[in-house]
Amino acid sequence: MQPYDAILLLSFGGPEAPDEVVPFLRRVTAGRGIPDERLEQVGQHYFLFGGRSPINDQNRALIAALRAELDARGDATPVIWGNRNSAPFLADTLREAHEAGMRRLVAVTTSAYSSYSSCRQYREDLAAAVDELKEEGRELVVDKIAPYAPRDGFRRANEHRLVEALRTLEGTPDEQVALLFVTHSIPTAMDETSGPGDGEGHLYQRQHLALASALTEGANAALGRDLTGELVFCSRSGPPQQAWLEPDVNDRLRELAAEGRTAVVAAPIGFVSDHMEVAYDLDTEAAATARDLGLHFVRAGTPGTDPHFVADLVDSVAERAAQARGEQTPDFEGRMPAVCAPGCCPNLRAARPALCGRD
């Protein structure tokens, strides 16, 4: 992994106790002027789970899986962990890394796609943390692997989970089964500007649609079915007057029931693990909608610590290290550059410095 001293797992973060919920949401919504009373309402889905998000435990599991994969390859590179919005906070992790003698890190984010929220915002937070340490006299270089939604390991892990879910519906005619690929909704303006600034935009949706198509083809071939999948969205959080990507998964469930479908498989391809948007928006809210409509609802798993996914993340880091050494790495369809092009997935609210890009 030379020239890297460590691998940094960089994640969104989440509360781990009820008294952490509102402070966590304050950090997530910083600068938007949302009162605590409203944050208490927004945080209700966390309180339903005891005020604890699943994401940190899943990050711990992923770190253990990455450690095991590295050990199996005879690689002792440390794996460290930082969050954007909860402990362990990114700046604290980088400070500890510097104190331990680390000077160059490679970041792996728990977000697979290209958009402002799923890529550039992580890069902005990296820049802010590195600048904070620089003011303390601590110099660190942080690189990042490219968005990995187009990679084979991510596809194989999702396909494995999808086939598992569909096997529970053996005997249900294809025309009765709806296959929904679910991801986090984002503002349409953010989707329109996702991707390189000189490109066609909509890269966030295009990456999802490409993966959904490959997964549908793979699952049909594995099971001898003839299903057609479609992309739907969850977790909208913007004001009503702002356009976000649609259809919402609950709205689509109502339409499917009216069309006479009897079973639905929801595959959350927009998520690396079963964190809160999956546990609440799908396992709680969408499952309740389906139950009320009389639909049999099956939720496919997320990649989590699937061996194909974990091995491919380590491959991604190894390829990024090779690039840092000036070596060639293999190409594949949809591959994104590790160093983002100018204007890629811009911040539409305010200009902020971002690492790992040419702008």
Image: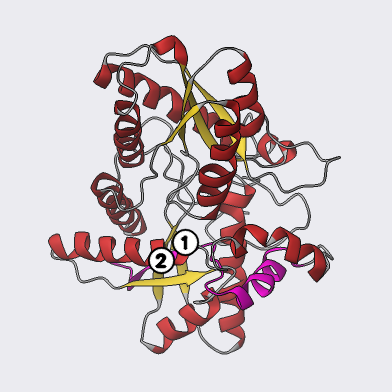
Q: Is residue 13 magenta?
A: yes
Q: Which residues are magenta?
A: 1-30
Secondary structure of the residue carrying numbered label 1: loop
Task: Inspect the image, locate mark 1, and give the three-letter code of the amino acid beneath it.
Answer: Pro
Q: Nearer the viewer, residue 344 or 203?
A: 203
- Other-residue count near label 2 (Cα within 10 Å), few / some / many at <14 / 14–19 / ≥20: some
Q: Position of residue 333 (x, y in %)?
A: 39, 30
Q: Residue at image x 67%, y 62%?
A: 43
Residue closest to the eye, 138 or 231 = 231
| Three-letter code for the amino acid on which mark 2 is drawn | Asp
Q: Is residue 340 above or below residue 87?
A: above
**Residue 3 marker:** none
Q: Is residue 139 magenta?
A: no
Q: Are marks 2 and 1 in contact (CB under 8 Å)?
A: yes
Quadrant of the snapshot with the N terminus: bottom left
- The part of the image, by quadrant, that contains residue 143 is bottom left
Q: Residue 263: where, in percent of width, then height?
A: 46, 23
- Locate residue 203 relative to residue 44 in the image: left or right: left
Tell me if residue 79 can be seen.
yes
* Circle 1 residues within 10 Å: few <14, some 14–19, many ≥20: many
On screen, residue 66 above or below 296? below
On the rendered image, what quadrant is the C terminus found in? bottom right
Q: CA distance from mark 2 to mark 1?
A: 6 Å
| Residue at the image point whose x is 46% and y is 38% from the top | 269
Viewer-proximal residue among 342 and 114? 114
Residue underneath mark 2:
57
Q: To which residue does mark 1 refer?
A: 54
Rendering coords of residue 264 (x, y %): 48, 26
